[in-house]
Image: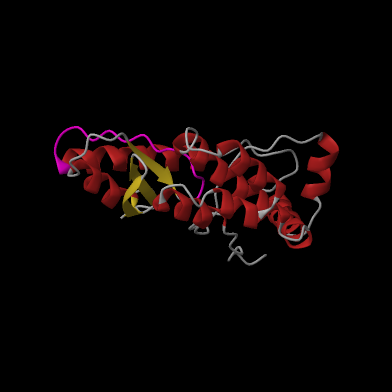
Amino acid sequence: MTNYLSRPCTAFAGTQQIASAALVDVALAIKHTKTHAPILTFDDATGAVIDLDLRGTTAEIVTRLTQRGEKEALAARTPRPRMKGEAPKPRGRPKLGVVAREVTLLPRHWEWLASQTGGASQALRRLIDDARRSDGGQTQIKVARERTYRFLSALAGDLPGFEEVTRALFAGDTDTFSHRMEAWPTDVRNYALALLQVTSPSEKPE
């Protein structure tokens, strides 16, 4: 199963959670769900809605999801032009988990990166890891709040007290955030609280 097909996600029919598993499993569960309520599927990592094309047979659905995953992977692997002074990449198997993206910097930044041990890519990774460790978890908190807000905006905008809930969310008042949702459907409340949880990154700096 590809990373895209195994992406953790959660589906709701109206305000009731009907599936929470890998994307491909959730898609097939929705396919066989009989309900008149609108169904939304959320990416557990981002809180964003995932659009699913559930037409046709199981094989056709899996094929479309696989093709979408391949397109995303191809876009992520698209190499950037080599900067001036950067040594060509050695032949051989690339490191697993490393994703190529374009970065725009001023010439002096590129010159400094090119002079660092291990080259520009390793220097950037070290800088990012140092920043993540030194910000006291604020970046992760921000990410958690944003994904929670995406979910709430998509599904809970018409629920009572929505504005008070979102104010408490961005104020960092977890107790009020939870309290304001007490009258909400249990599945919506529980998923919002789960999205707000901050997990520590497992990556080790190079």
Q: How is the image coloured?
A: secondary structure
Asked if residue 103 lies in the magenta stretch, the reply is: no
Q: Nearer the viewer, residue 58 or 2?
A: 58
Q: How many marks?
A: 0
Task: Answer yes or no: is residue 78 visible.
Answer: no
Q: Quadrant of the N terminus?
A: bottom left
Q: Is residue 187 left or right of residue 91?
A: left
Q: Residue at x 31, y 34 (%)?
A: 38
Q: Nearer the viewer, residue 158 or 26?
A: 158
Give x and y (percent) for residue 48.
48, 40
Task: Answer yes or no: is residue 123 visible.
Answer: yes
Residue stretch rendered in magenta on the structure: 45-58
Q: Nearer the viewer, residue 94 or 103?
A: 103
Q: Report which quarter residue 166 is drawn in.
A: top right
Asked if residue 53 lies in the magenta stretch, the reply is: yes
Q: Is residue 126 left or right of residue 102?
A: right
Q: Is residue 123 left or right of residue 20?
A: right
Give x and y (percent) for residue 118.
72, 59
Most common SS among magenta residues: loop
Give x and y (percent) for residue 152.
51, 40
Give x and y (percent) for residue 61.
22, 39
Q: Residue at x 72, y 54 (%)?
A: 138
Q: Is residue 118 above or below residue 49?
A: below
Farthest-out residue, left: 57
Q: Quadrant of the C terminus?
A: bottom right
Q: Is residue 68 above or below residue 126?
A: above
